[in-house]
Structure formats: C-alpha cells, structure tokens
Image (tube, rainbow, N blue to C red):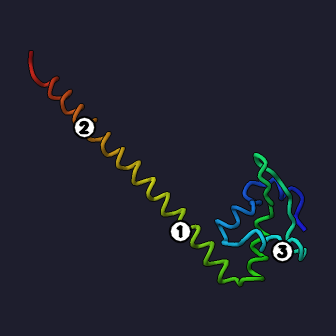
C-alpha cells in the first residue's frame, strides 16, 4: 500500500491518459491491475470527463511484472529521449535569437564607438 502523503507528492501520480502516453498501456490494462489488487487508484473528473489516477511507482512495478523489465526500461528511455530532443530544440531556438540580438548589439556598439572617436 502507498505511504502516507504519496498521493500528494508531485510526480507520484499519473492519470490513465498520461500512462498511455508515457508507458504505452491502455486503460483496460490499468483496470486489470486495479482488479488484481496491484494498483491503488482514485477517480477524478475534469470538465465532465472521468479519469483514473494511479501511483507511478505501483504502475511501474505492475508493468514490470506483466510486460517485463526490458519493456519498462525501453519505454522510459524513449520518453526521456523525446524530452531531451525537445529541450535541445528549444535551446537551439533560444540560441538563434540570442545570436541575432548579439549581432545587433555589436553593430550598435561599434557605431557608438566610431561616433565617439570622430571629432566634431
């Protein structure tokens, strides 16, 4: 069973929709785990759409038992790979913007320094 406060710890829970995205498991797979007594859950609803919330640690253990540790490692690595690629892409975009701004500032500063050197 879950430790006290685990349900409110950031990142400790995930919805059935997020579980499908991150681990490739269906809602039915999660329901089977709940019925087998392997997963604790809480029900919720957002804008009238129901969802199931489960504990990440328990879900990972259940996936490992049912689908194997290699499957779990593979899926976790794929998710991390996507996140790293996304962050690299965002950093490249920021770098391009900063390079343009640097060039603009260099031009401005060189113009200002040449204005100071020329006598009036």
In the picture shown, does residue 99 fall above or below 62? above
Viewer-closest of 9 and 76: 76
Using residue 104 as the reference point, say whether residue 88 is left or right of it: right
Instruction: Determine the CA span between mark 2 and mark 3.
Output: 61 Å
**Which image quarter is the C terminus in?**
top left
Using residue 77 as the reference point, say whether residue 58 is left or right of it: right
Instruction: Determine the CA span between mark 1 and mark 2.
Output: 37 Å
- Who comes first in sequence, dot 3 or dot 1? 3
Instruction: Determine the CA span between mark 3 and mark 1.
Output: 27 Å
The residue beneath circle 2 is 106
Mark 3 falls on what kind of element?
helix
- Who comes first in sequence, dot 2 or dot 3? 3
Report the residue at 18% width, 29% height from top. 111
Tag shown at residue 96: none
Q: Position of residue 38 (x, y in %)?
A: 86, 74
Q: Position of residue 58 (x, y in %)?
A: 80, 70
The residue beneath circle 1 is 81
């Amino acid at each position: 069973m879950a430790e006290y406060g685990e349900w409110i710890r950031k990142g400790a829970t995930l919805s059935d929709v997020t579980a499908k995205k991150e681990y490739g498991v269906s809602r039915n797979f999660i329901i089977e785990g709940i019925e087998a007594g392997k997963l604790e859950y809480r029900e919720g609803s957002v804008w009238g759409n129901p969802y199931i919330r489960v504990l990440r640690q328990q879900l990972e253990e259940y996936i490992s038992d049912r689908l194997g540790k290699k499957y779990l490692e593979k899926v976790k690595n794929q998710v991390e790979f996507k996140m790293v690629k996304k962050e690299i892409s965002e950093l490249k975009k920021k770098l391009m913007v900063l390079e343009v701004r640097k060039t603009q500032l260099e031009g401005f500063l060189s113009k200002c320094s040449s204005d100071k050197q020329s006598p009036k």
